[in-house]
Image (cartoon, rainbow, N blue to C red):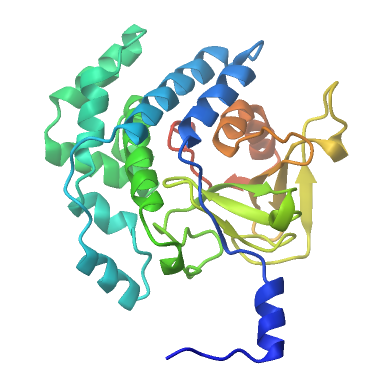
Amino acid sequence: MSRILEPGHIEAAASAPPFIHLPPPNLFDLRRARLEHLAVGHPLAEYLRFAASLCQFQQGLMDHPPSTSPLDPERIRLCLEHGLPPLAADSLVREADWPPYLEALLQQYQAASDPVHAALAQLRAASGEQRKVWALALLGGQYAGLPAALVPFLGAALQVAWSHWLLGLPEDLLRPGDELQQCPACGSPAMAGVIRHRGKFNGLRYLVCSLCACEWHVVRVKCIYCEQSKGLRYYSFEDDRYPAGLAPLRAECCVGCKRYLKLVYLEHDAEAEALSVDLASLALDLRLDQEGYQRLAPNLLLAPGGD
């Protein structure tokens, strides 16, 4: 039966910001282009170009995915019934047919250096069960549970599988998670935030999922970890192109919980992309670590250093 909206409800629905912003089908090609652009003259140019090569391979898998078993609609229904995201990563990584994405990478990706060749050889030699154990550790943030050199390859395979599933999912199934930083599609933590500047998204903050690249709206000037609005500070690097106040990348740091999240301001760089900007700004992470701030946001193409 249809529900008739009263005038006040109509106005509220019309003014409410869109909750979800889905990634484009050419997401990984956009990432590749930005990584190659950022690599020019960058101290980490070699790694950024390596990440770009993985993104190029990911786009190929998005355009021509391997033959896999479809997701079980009953499983999705049960997830929603129990308040879980429909693509819940912590369980799907055990049950869903994502390994063919990794297998395609292992068969087709060409190693350009000895360390890459060694990492691929280690993954090829591992059993399917061992690969799932490593994937569980990676998605759970337990980096000590897998060799660091395997992170970008496992991360790349997992990202493209979940992004592919996300784009085939009805958008109306996505609801806010229990925590601001939790992706409504797969439950993974946010990698960064993007401040949009066009049309109905103008001025809105969307968090970007570290796994499936779903973006969801979270109000600005609020710590996504402890939800405090007071005591937030913003750090950025000033360079010849942008003064600090107009930098396209700033870190929102919470004095209360001592955690931070990187924010990408598209107003100041319309072509910026969260994952590539994050990898290109590791110097900012080092600075914030020295200031006593903790990073919780993962980037699945890079194993964090330290503890």
Q: Position of residue 168 (x, y in %)?
A: 36, 53
Question: Which is nearer the eye, 13 or 113?
Answer: 13
Image quadrant assignment for residue 205? bottom right
Give the left or right position of residue 43, taking residue 69 as reference: right
Question: Which is nearer the eye, 180 or 133?
Answer: 180
Q: In percent of the image, x 34 and y 58: which residue is there?
A: 87
Question: Which is nearer the eye, 294 or 138?
Answer: 138
Question: Which is nearer the eye, 288 or 49?
Answer: 49
Give the left or right position of residue 94, taking residue 252 as reference: left
Give the left or right position of residue 306, taking residue 138 as reference: right
Q: How many marks?
A: 0
Q: In percent of the image, x 48 and y 53: which residue is there?
A: 189
Q: Position of residue 198 (x, y in %)?
A: 73, 49
Image quadrant assignment for residue 110? top left
Q: Is residue 120 above or below residue 162?
A: above
Q: Quadrant of the N terminus?
A: bottom left
Q: In percent of the image, x 26 and y 39: which residue is there?
A: 134
Q: Is residue 249 above or below residue 223?
A: above
Q: Position of residue 199 (x, y in %)?
A: 73, 53
Q: Is residue 145 above or below residue 208?
A: above
Q: In percent of the image, x 70 and y 66: which residue is there?
A: 228
Q: Is residue 200 above or below residue 128?
A: below
Q: Position of residue 129 (x, y in %)?
A: 13, 41
